[in-house]
Amino acid sequence: MKPTLSDLEKIARGAGAILRDGYNREHDITYKGVIDLVTESDHASEKFILDEIHARFPGSPILTEESGKIEGAREGIWYIDPLDGTVNYAHHIPFFSVSIAYAVNGIVQFGAVYDPLRDEMFLAERGSGSMLNGTPLKATKTTTLERSLLVTGFPYDTWNTKQDNFKNFERLAKLTQGVRRLGSAALDSAYVGAGRFEGFWEYGLRPWDIAAGGLIAEEAGARVTTIDGKADYITPPQSVIVAAPGVYDEIKKALNNVGQD
């Protein structure tokens, strides 16, 4: 038996309830890197998701942020981020999500991104559109950068990488109405699909960061590619553009011209 979009929604809601219940508590924080945190809620949310998948779809391959690759013999693979926005969560900043996607042969078929504090459930099924709490989503029709609001993120290895994204941030902030940095790539992508942002870009993501949000944006009419325009944004390393079609080319040009002017 293959999963359905309803299965992803139910699992995401259950994991989101765990995050919501733990949000205002003092957190047990450990560090994978200088600014790469893990809380007890990451682990509790992931355990819930894995238990649900193992119970409903035994033998499924799963790629998840905290446990890594779980092998399986079933067709398809799950991409799981049990808490996207851990730094926000650890500091009691109310912007984080659960992200769950299911892909077959490298193509994402279903995606769910859930914001438990706002009770906003973003869902998408390939070929059937995307929704926010049951209402269809559409990317904006904006056609100029000067009328656009963008969002981005920065890599965990900011101090050790040449592509730290700061020059891009500066360039695009000067070309647009502004650039936000909110801290959850899954929600950033979903917000492009919802028309709240015209575009999102980020370097050095992982499949679980972009799989669900990317499909939600795609099915809302946004363009989702790698920074250099390739259609496969799931295969590592993920450096992506998610943008309304009217400004995609301008964003891509600006990102690929940084350092050349």
Image (cartoon, grey):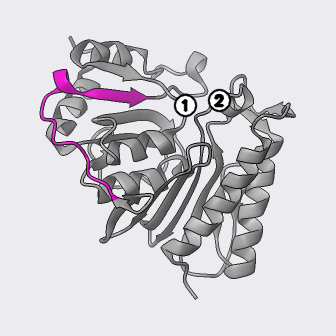
Please identify the quarter of the rendering in which residue 46 is found: bottom right
Decide which of 87, 107 is in the foreground and name it.
Answer: 87
For mark 2, give the secondary structure: helix
Looking at the picture, how far across and down is residue 150, in whole percent?
33, 28
Disc 2 marks a residue whose amino acid type is: Asn
> What segment is highlighted magenta in the picture?
136-152
Task: Please indicate whether residue 106 sits to the left or right of residue 255 in the image.
Answer: right
Q: Is residue 140 left or right of residue 1?
A: left
Quickly name the residue at label 2. Answer: 88
Quadrant housing residue 13 = bottom right
Q: Is residue 237 left or right of residue 140?
A: right
Quick one: 13 or 70, which is closer to the camera? 13
* Residue occupied by mark 1: 183
Q: Earlier in the sequence, mark 2 or mark 1?
A: 2
| Mark 2 vs 1: CB contact within 8 A | yes
Question: What residue sits 62% from the left and 60% below the top?
Answer: 12
Q: Residue 137 lies in magenta, yes or no?
A: yes
User: Under tag 1, what secondary structure?
Assistant: loop
Q: Position of residue 256 (x, y in %)?
A: 26, 28
Q: For residue 149, say whether it is visible.
A: yes
In the rendered image, which quarter contains the N terminus?
A: bottom right
Q: Amino acid at mark 1?
A: Gly
